[in-house]
Each structure stands twice: as C-alpha cells, then as structure tokens.
C-alpha cells in the first residue's frame, strides 16, 4: 500500500492522536476512516433528516402559537452536537470569531468558549 506523509503542527499532531483513540491510537486508520469512512456520510445524512424535521416543526409553529417545543429543542441540540463533533477546535474558533465579527451574540457564556 502506498504511503503518504503530511506535515502538521505539534497541536495538530496531538489532536490527531487524541481523536485516534477509538482506533487504538492508530492515526493512519483514524484519517482513513475520517476521509473515506461512512461516518461523515452518516452525520450529513442525519443532519439532513434533522433539518427536514426542524423545518416541519417550524412550519407547524408558525401556524400555531410561536412556542419552541421540546421536540424542536432536542432536534436543534442534536444538530449542534453533531456539527461540533465534526469540527476541529481550529474551525470552531474560526466560527466563533466570525460570530464576533458579525456582532452576533453567542448563546454560550464567554468562559465556555474555549474551543
């Protein structure tokens, strides 16, 4: 099997090693699974389903009283967790910086925004 080498920062190396725990610390297996495995497709598929459910619940709410239901809250929380699990800390920091730049207030307290 051919070998591919990449250069990463020390922080990226540590992150890869931490994320590869479910592969017994085998970084190569983790990267192959992340790039070519079914996990990302499953996450995207689940997000599509959640998006459709949120849209249908939102449509129901606009016809009725505009109260956020427990069902829509649970769906939004699951979508947020799935998205956060799929992003690296660097991308989370970049997203938070973009929110700050756009002056969009985060729902998350500042002390929890370590990313």
Image (cartoon, rainbow, N blue to C red):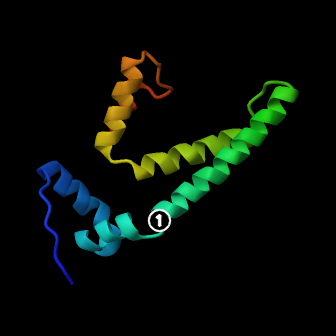
Residue extending furthest toward the right: 64
Q: Residue at x 79, y 24 (%)?
A: 66
- Left/right placement of residue 69 relative to residue 90 reads right
Q: Circle 1 is placed at which residue position?
A: 39
Crowding around mark 1 (Cα neighbors within 10 Å: few <14, some 14 to 19, many 20+) is few
Residue extending furthest toward the bottom: 1
| In this view, 18 is above or below 76 | below
The image shows a total of numbered marks equal to 1
- Left/right placement of residue 2 relative to residue 66 reads left
State the image quarter where residue 91 is shown. top left
State the image quarter where residue 114 is shown. top left
Residue extending furthest toward the front: 2
Callout 1: SS: helix
Q: Position of residue 6 (x, y in %)?
A: 14, 61
| In this view, 89 is above or below 97 | below
Q: Nearer the viewer, residue 29 or 5?
A: 5
Which quadrant does the C terminus fall into?
Answer: top left
Which quadrant does the N terminus fall into?
Answer: bottom left
Q: Position of residue 43 (x, y in %)?
A: 52, 58
Q: Residue at x 58, y 51 (%)?
A: 47
State the image quarter where residue 23 is shown. bottom left
Q: Is residue 114 visible?
A: no
Q: Is residue 109 visible?
A: yes
Q: Residue at x 44, y 46 (%)?
A: 84
Q: Position of residue 63 (x, y in %)?
A: 87, 28
Q: Position of residue 72 (x, y in %)?
A: 71, 40
Q: Residue at x 33, y 48 (%)?
A: 88
């Amino acid at each position: 099997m051919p070998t591919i080498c990449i250069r990463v920062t020390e922080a990226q190396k540590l992150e890869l090693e931490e994320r590869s725990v479910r592969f017994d610390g085998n970084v190569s297996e983790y990267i192959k699974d992340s790039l070519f495995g079914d996990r990302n497709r499953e996450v995207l598929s689940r997000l599509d389903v959640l998006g459709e459910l949120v849209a249908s619940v939102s449509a129901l709410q606009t016809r009725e009283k505009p109260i956020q239901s427990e069902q829509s809250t649970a769906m939004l929380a699951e979508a947020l967790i799935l998205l956060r699990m799929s992003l690296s800390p660097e991308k989370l920091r970049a997203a938070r910086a973009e929110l700050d730049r756009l002056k969009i207030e985060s729902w998350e307290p500042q002390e929890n925004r370590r990313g």
